[in-house]
Amino acid sequence: MKKKAIEKIPYLRVKENQQKDVKYIGVTAVKIVGHEKHLFLEVYRNHKGSKDTPAVRIVLTKKDFGTYWPEREEWTRQKVKTDRYYGGLIWAERSDTWQAEKENVLQSTEDLERIKKFCKATVYNESHWWQYIYRHEEDIVITDRRNREHRKYMRRQEELADRMAHTEELPEKKILDRANSVYFQNEHYLYYKKHGSWAKIACSKCGGVTDARWRNGISYESQFQRWTEEPREGNYGTCPICGARGKYQCQGKVRGAHSRSIYLFLGQKYKENGMVMRYVEVEKRWMLGFICGDQGPEMYNASEELSGIEIARAYFEPGKKTKIDYHKHDPYTGKDFWDDCNLNGLANITINAGQIMRETYEEMKETMFRYSALQEYAESMRKINPIDYLERYSQTPQIEILVKMGLTDVVEKLVKCYYGLIADQNARRPDQFLGIRKERVKQLIRNKGDIQLLKVMKMEKRHGQNWTDEQIKHLAETDLSGVQVEMATGYMTLQKLLNRIERYAGCRYGTGCGHASERIRNTATTYADYLSMRLSLGYDLNNTVYQQPRDLGAAHTRMVLETNQEEMDQHLKQAAEKYPEIRRAYRGLRNKYFYEDDSYLIRPARSAEEIVMEGRVLHHCVGGGTYLSKHNTGKTYILMLRYRAEPDVPYITVEIDAMNPRIIQWYGNKDGKPDQENMQAWLDAWLMKLKAGTLTVYENDGYESQEVRIRVPAAVSA
Ligand SMILES: [Zn+2]
């Protein structure tokens, strides 16, 4: 859009419209700017003073549009209306008016014709003339977006093609031979079936099937017969025909074919000093064929097959993001192709750890990874994923030093992206990098970078401590957190803490026995837990009796109970403070609602605490804020129905309407209705008496003279 040239073109101006409803008037013109036809639409306010300058000027060409705001002297790329169906027009003050067609008109029918001719869109209601402009603009926006996406796709395809063109051919034969000799150890199978002193043997290497004698015969002929060792499942033997070594497998256990797969990585130099890591799966299949013989199936040939497929390629270049291409199969065309993205969901192609072919290291010498220590790392691990390793090395080159020092465990964690291990990403020295004391590095190396040990060393540094090698080792075994250690060492030395854990556990540190370490970890947690509960209950931990309970397990349980009791008391106290009216109103309510017969009694709740406890003991929700608050404000009342013989044991809880005597609900344990028919009848009878005013009131029932404090064992609430 030639904005400067367009701004120089004078405004079209408009005639005033006498109709009152009209708020905006559009006027159009087609003008040539830079040899291209432009449609101008100017919208004026229908005021006397607004005939010279439009509120907005919209300019369209075949492939572009722009919106100019004269008052702000500003260009925007807003469409003529917002993208909803009844979207508002951009110049209108009110955006969603029913009157749009009356308020926004064109100056003449020529204007409409001009718009229709230029925009060529289909619009059902011509009085909504702005729809033509909107459709035209929308087409432009969609086409632009589509072109952008297409350009992006084309660029990615070009890059993919470029990578493929710069990738050397895969030395397939070499890979298969190597896989067979090194990773499958040239494994062959000798399938056998014994009959008497004879065995029928099928060799997967040469495919031959032969009969051989495995037990010495006594006849003269037997010394000329083919002789073999006795075939035994899983043992190795020699094929009597071709002499290959193979593993015996009983014919009866073989079902057609079986296979094994391995994953290999081959790194090659890519472009100037980049590298491509190629991920290949090699599969070996052993097959045994059968034909029908006189006595059931007979082996007739055996074979083996080696096949490989390249699954993915990871490209590394200095300063660029790692690009991974995937080999895919199109089931419709039946063709294989390379793509620059993985498959979605369950079909996702994963790259497993595998073996790295030694040619990789030779190629690596001339690439950005010549100092990556990949070889040293691969040698210290059984299988690795070199793509992950090299990616991490690109981000964190310190990995090289860590590998060379033998801190394998630390590197393994880093490769798996546990970056929380790093104290200072920019540090060059390993102690600063990991956040441990300089003196600790040697011990960490001796233990191959053990993560548990590293955790404790970091703790030591963080707390400004100076522990012994042995203390570090033992503390690592306990698996205690920094917070736990800090809490405990506030009251005892680290050595004392360690000794006590050892004594309570009843087994020693450093035995290397799984059971003992588990026991130590468990005991350490229990002890730390015990100490912190004691502490938060307000006990003085300087007291050695509290520090060293005779029976740790029992003491721990006691603390758990006490902690819960504490919480519950806290809760009761809060309820009492929040709903004081319940206690205050009790006496009066009791006179009104109390009733008892030979079996049961009913009375209002004495206090908020009692309602909370009732809810806890019976496991229903009456102890919640709603009921408490309704009782407190006198809207509804909570009554306790109990056995007369056990007046302190919660049985049934009743909610009644305060104004108009009726039972809103009643429940027993766990929202159940115990003895339902009987209790409902009892309650109905009570309600009748209440309404009739015939409840007998006992002035002193014996429960009131003493304040009954309910203490329920803490375990109930736990
Ligand atoms: Zn053979």
Image: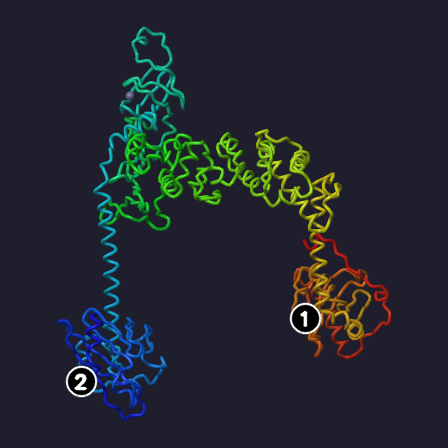
Q: Nearer the viewer, residue 429 or 272?
A: 429
Labelled pair 1, 2 in contact (Cβ < 8 Å): no
Q: Quadrant of residue 143?
A: bottom left
Q: Position of residue 691 (x, y in %)?
A: 75, 78
**Which residue extends farthest bottom?**
18
Q: Position of residue 208 (x, y in %)?
A: 27, 22
Compared with 582, 185 (above or below) is above
Compared with 325, 34 (above or below) is below
Q: Position of residue 480 (x, y in %)?
A: 60, 41
Q: Secondary structure at mark 2?
A: helix
**Which residue extends farthest top?**
220
Compared with 137, 376 (above or below) is above
Q: Is residue 123 left or right of residue 196?
A: left
Is residue 638 visible in the rendered image? The answer is yes
- For disc 1, the neighbor class at 10 Å (few under 14, some 14 to 19, many from 20) is some
The first of marks 1 and 2 along the sequence is 2
The residue singled out by tag 1 in the image is: 629
The residue singled out by tag 2 in the image is: 110
Q: Is residue 480 left or right of residue 61?
A: right
Nearer the camera: disc 1 or disc 2: 2
Name the residue located 59 percent from the left edge and 36 percent from the top edge: 466
Name the residue located 72 percent from the left edge and 45 percent from the top edge: 541
Q: Nearer the viewer, residue 151 or 12?
A: 12
The amino acid marked with disc number 2 is Glu
Marks 1/2: CA distance? 74 Å
Quadrant into which the N terminus falls = bottom left
